[in-house]
Image (spheres, rainbow, N blue to C red):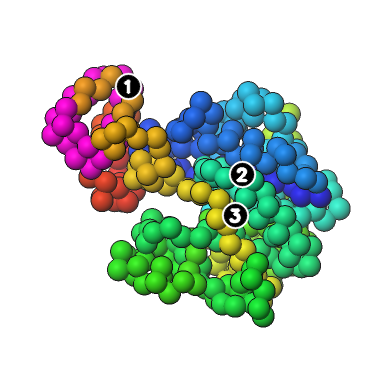
Amino acid sequence: MIIPIILSGGAGSRLWPISTKICPKQLLPLLSNRSLLQETVCRINKLRNTMNPLLVCNQQHGFKVIKQLQQVGVKPSAIILEPVGKNTAPAIVVAALQALNDNEDPILLVLPSDHVIGNIGVFHKTIEIAKQYADAGKLVAFGVVPTHPEIGYGYIRTEALGGDASAYKIAEFVEKPDSKTAQKYINAGNYYWNSGMFMFRASKLLKEIERHAPDILQICKDAYATHVIDKDFIHLDKITFDKCPSNSIDYVVMEKTSDAIMVPLDADWSDIGSWLSLWEYGQKDINGNIISGDVVAKDVSGSYIHATGRKIVAVGVKDHIIVETNAGILVVHKDDCQKIKELNHE
């Protein structure tokens, strides 16, 4: 059986001022009348041999998460509350411990809660391919087939896997590049966007963690061993979990193990990680604009303008993001969207 592990601990800081620490992007309806989290759990409903999802989220978002799941009729197998965010490796480890506690060594399908996937049919088929490798003891990363030289994503460099066209050997994970380097990656043809989605058997993941990051495994075991169950939630021991190193599963395991492979995903994917990506993915008018709320626009093109409480009047604006909420007002050129995370705006 497959247990979807939904990671919902991100802050979405590049989508400020809509996404905030109190209500991050995964809990917001950015592209439909459902939140990104709700879209995530709904798109796996029809997967074969799949159990109820197990969620890991920040403790301050627990009640929002359970309410949103109830709204779409999804009952989680458990919701693990992190007292403090420690990146993806500890989150996945505690999820694996919980999955093994309730089941006989299931396959874990790790999914971020804040992505969008346009072609769900292809997504499901790709998962079926990945499952075959996970059954065989491999740790699988889903690499998105790139459509352009994107600077907002990390990349996976791959090598051929013995003539197998459905998967590739992972050579390395590389950080977000500058535009020139991103173009080189596209030209090379063996680089894929790192989706942050993975699949592996729970016991295999823990075995590799023990080999490459025993400190993370031990602290997670200690924090989980003294967990407290409160209705729908599993509370980890805060003092213990706070000692855990903060690191991603990419670098702790996937880049170090000899059993990691990558399966290509070509399913109209986006992580909606910035205002630019939200503009790129959204439905635009004849002038290339996405406009919502009380907005008056004249001679405006290629822009995203969103008002929630006050009127926005824009004249002669091109390729800009203008967003107004109670948290603040953002005005930024689309080319500079990645810089929002660098500012201390909260």
Quadrant of the image containing the C terminus: top left
* Mark 1 or mark 3, earlier in chain: 3
CA gap between label 3 and label 2 equals 15 Å
- Residue at image position (49%, 72%) is 190
CA gap between label 1 and label 2 equals 30 Å
User: In this orientation, which residue lies closer to the viewer: 217 or 323?
Assistant: 323
Residue type pointed to by label 1: Gly
Magenta region, residue range: 298-321
* Location of mark 2 (residue): 120
Residue extending farthest to the bottom is 162
Taking the magenta stretch, the answer to whether it contains residue 19 is: no
Residue 318 place in picture, x, y as percent? 19, 40
* Mark 3 or mark 2, earlier in chain: 2
Q: Is residue 195 visible?
A: yes
Residue 296 place in picture, x, y as percent? 21, 22
* Location of mark 3 (residue): 197
User: In this orientation, which residue lies closer to the viewer: 259 or 103?
Assistant: 259
CA gap between label 1 and label 3 equals 34 Å
- Residue at image position (39%, 59%) is 148
* Location of mark 1 (residue): 293
